[in-house]
Amino acid sequence: MPSLLDLTSQGDVGTISDESKLSSVKLMTPQELYELWERQNWQSHTIDFEQDRADWNDLDGDLRENIAWNLSSFFVGEERVTTQFSGLVMSYESQAEEAFLTTQQVDEARHAQHFNRFYEQVLGLDGSFEDRLARAREDLNPAFIEMFDGVLVDWGKRLIANPSDIEAKVDFVTLYHMIIEGTLALTGQWFLTDYMERNGILPGWTEGFKLISQDEHRHVAYGTWFLREKARDEGLKQRIAERLAELIPLASAVLVPPGADLGDYAILDYTMAETNAFAFNALQRRLKVIGIDTAMLSARRPDGRRATRSSRLQTLAEPGLRAGSAALLKDEPVVVEQLAFEADLVGAHAGGEGQAEVGAGQPARHQAQLQQRLAQATRADARVPLADRLDVVQTPV
Ligand SMILES: [Fe+2]
Ligand SMILES: [Fe+2]
């Protein structure tokens, strides 16, 4: 009988090729994942960037800018997930879980170190780690800032305030392992690595990025294990579904390059349809193992408001959906509102013009409210819970 490692990359069921195995798969435990980490340790500081420097200088200006945007998201993302991780370590429920979680935190620090070295040695940015990070931050879109400076920080603080709060822990792992790592990071890693290898450029960066990806799959394997354990409780299972319904629209806006058309963008030479399909197919596989049917994402909230419909998750994975979203979604006011929200985030970054297509027909008061929400969400001293921040998005019109 094949082991989970034979069937998957790093015990991450999102990579399982035979989906008929999903219902019977035995997940790796934190102890097994810790031992895997010991076998796979690596050093960021020994990677050679000599060829990368030559390649970077030879790149066409537009392509260099495009790649730089993608790298900035990862550099800042790795710093964020390192510095905001401590609450989860504090929340351990067994010695094995504590051992694994400490390895994850040091992994994330190593990932940030890889990017810092690349920015210093290949992009030639002088100064400190913080100086280079500040430069990378200039490239981010508002959805990214909302997710990594807003939601991640808030939910991490909630866990630090009370590490034994199991609901706070479930929220944090849903955000961190399912959305940030499983849906965003691993998608970007797969396509960027494929692009560099197809074009034969940036070999040092690619070497480090593949090792980062190996670590990330192991992290997501832990998150899947943890959420499956907690989802045995119906209340917590419902909670995971609600958190996903809140986070998925924001996550899909994080992937959109600055100034790009929300309904039809590309990441390097991969289409929106390809990247969305990869991201959300993997998420759906993990959810199936955890025991969450995507139909749960359409469940009504206890307060009577409707959470994101399951069609939202499915449609994100369908080629070309967003280009025809207005016609397809005309009976879906909640989803249309979400698209408007995303368009608003992108539009704000693009100088206010980007929302014209998808946001067309939105009442002016909604646009104003959304702008207000965004401004509020990006002020560190004015944090409000995500559910409240997205209230305008989730309330049916
Ligand atoms: Fe990482
Ligand atoms: Fe990670």
Image: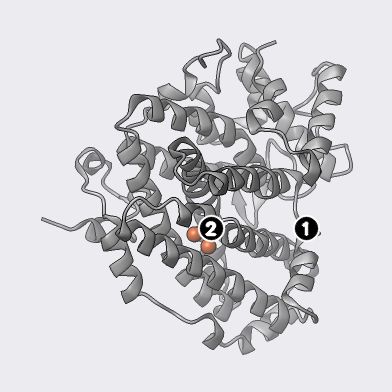
| Horizontal relation, residue 395 to residue 368: left or right | left
Say which quadrant the C terminus sits in: top right
User: Foreground: 290 or 360?
Assistant: 290
Q: Residues within 10 Å of mark 1 (few under 14, many from 20)?
A: some
Q: Quadrant of residue 71?
A: bottom right
Vertical order, 98 against 117 (above or below): above
User: Foreground: 345 or 219?
Assistant: 219
Q: Quadrant of residue 199?
A: bottom right
Provide the residue designation for mark 1: 139
Q: Quadrant of residue 393?
A: top right
What is the count of numbered marks? Answer: 2
Point 63% across, 18% down: residue: 334
Relative image position of residue 339 (x, y in whole percent): 68, 28
Provide the residue designation for mark 2: 86
What amino acid is at disc 2? Ser
Q: Residues within 10 Å of mark 2 (few under 14, many from 20)?
A: some
Q: CA distance from mark 1 to mark 2?
A: 27 Å
Relative image position of residue 340 (x, y in whole percent): 73, 27
Point 79% across, 31% down: residue: 373
> Outermost residue toward the left?
1
Relative image position of residue 93 (x, y in whole percent): 35, 50
Point 22% across, 45% down: residue: 25
Q: Mark 2 and mark 1 in contact (Cβ < 8 Å)?
A: no
Sequence order check, earlier mark of 1 and 2: 2
Relative image position of residue 277 (x, y in whole percent): 49, 42
- Beta carbon of the mark 2 residue lies under 8 A of ligand 2: no
Say which quadrant the N terminus sits in: bottom left
What amino acid is at disc 1? Asp
Vertical order, 209 against 282 (above or below): below
| Horizontal relation, residue 50 to residue 299: left or right | right
Could you say which disc has been placed on residue 65 in the image?
none
Vertical order, 390 against 124 (above or below): above
